[in-house]
Amino acid sequence: MTELLELSLDPVACLERAAEVIRGGGLCAFPTETVYGLGANALDAEAVARIFAAKGRPATNPLIVHVADVAGAQRVVKAWPPAAEALAARFWPGPLTLVLPRADMVPDITTAGLDSVAVRVPDHAFARDLIRAAGGAVAAPSANRSTAVSPTTAQHVLEELDGRIELVIDGGPTRVGIESSVVSLLDGEVRLLRPGDVSRAQLEAVVGPVGAKGTGPARSPGMMSRHYAPQAEVRLVQSSDLSAHAGREAAALVHRASPEGYGCVRRLPGDPAGYAKGLYAALRELDGAWQRIVVERVPDDEAWAAVRDRLGRAAR
Ligand code: AMP
Ligand code: MG
C-alpha cells in the first residue's frame, strides 16, 4: 500500500515524511507545476533504479534532475554557459528543462549513460522545499507507468503506481498540466528538444534563434513517438470532419466545434494554457470508457505547439 498525505492538511508533516522517504532511497510522488513527479535521490543509483522499475521505463530514457535553485543546478553540471544563466534568470522557477554537460557526481543510470544531464527548478514551493530537504537533487519523471498519460492529480498517480511506491503527496491538480519544455545547450547551441509551456518565441526573446532537435548530442533520447498514449484509438481530425468520424461508441474531444452523433462530447478550453491544463485528465476520463477518442485538431500556430506535440503522440 502506498501512503497518501494531503499537502493542505499538514505541510510540515508532508515535507518531513517525503524527505525521509527520498533520503532513505525510496520513491515519493509529489506535485510540481507541470505534472506529478516520481521522485528519488538523483545521486543514488539504486534509488534511481527503483524509478525505472516502478514506471517500467526503458533504461535508455534519461531522467530530469530537479533542483531547488541555480546553485543546485550548477552542482550537477560541468559547464554553465551564458545561455544557461540567461534562461534560468528568466524562466526559473518554471517549466523549462536545460540539458548541459553532466558533473561526475551524477550516476550513469540517471542520464541513461549520456554525458549530459537535464536540470530544472520547478515552480512549486513544496517541490523546492522537498528537493532541498532531500539533499538537493531529485530525479522526477512523470509519476505514471511508462507510455501512459502523465498524472495531473494524486488520484491519477495512485491509479497506476499504488503499491509500487512509498508515498504520494496530494497537492491538488497541477497548474500547467503538460511536461516542461526541454532545451539543449550542448555544443554552444540552443535547441528546443521538446515543446512545452515556455514557447520558442519566449526562448528566442532571451537567447536569439533557437534550433530544432537534431542528431548526436542534441537529439532527444527517450522521446518515443508513442509516449503519452491512451488505450483507446485516438484520431485527430479537422473540425469540419468531426461528423464523418462520429459514432455512439466514440467520444469527441473538442474546443470549438459542437459535433453530433457521438456517445460523448468532452469540451476543453479554447486557449492553449487552459487546454493543456485539462488535456491529460480528459484523456484519462475518456480512455477506457470509449473505444475511440476523436480529437478536434488544435490551431497550427506556435502558441499551440506543446499541445499539438502531446496530441500527436497520443494519436500514434
Ligand atoms: P520526462 O519524461 O518528463 O521525465 O522527461 C524526460 C525527457 O527529457 C527525456 O525523455 C528526454 O527526452 C529529455 N532528456 C532528459 N535528459 C536528457 C539529456 N541528457 N539529453 C537530452 N534529453 C534529455
Ligand atoms: Mg513521462
Image (spheres, helix red, strand yellow):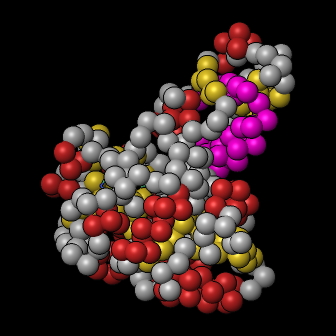
Quadrant in the picture for residue 241: top right
Q: Is residue 238 above or below residue 197?
A: above
The magenta region covers 272-298
Residue 163 sits above or below residue 166 on the image:
above
What percent of the width, then of the height, locates residue 213?
29, 41
Position of residue 91 relative to residue 183, above or below, is below
Q: Classify residue 293 by image quadrant.
A: top right
Instruction: Say left or right for 159 vs 39.
Output: right
Can you see residue 252?
no
Numbered circles on residues, count? 0
Q: Which residue is at a point 33% across and 48% down the rendered structure image?
A: 221
User: Within the magenta stretch, is there residue 184?
Assistant: no
Residue 94 rendering spot, x and y as whole percentages: 48, 64
**Residue 184 falls left or right of residue 166:** left
Reply yes or no: does residue 281 show up in magenta: yes
In-front residue for pair 251/41: 41
Q: Quadrant of the N terminus?
A: bottom right
Horizontal and vertical percent position of residue 176: 59, 55
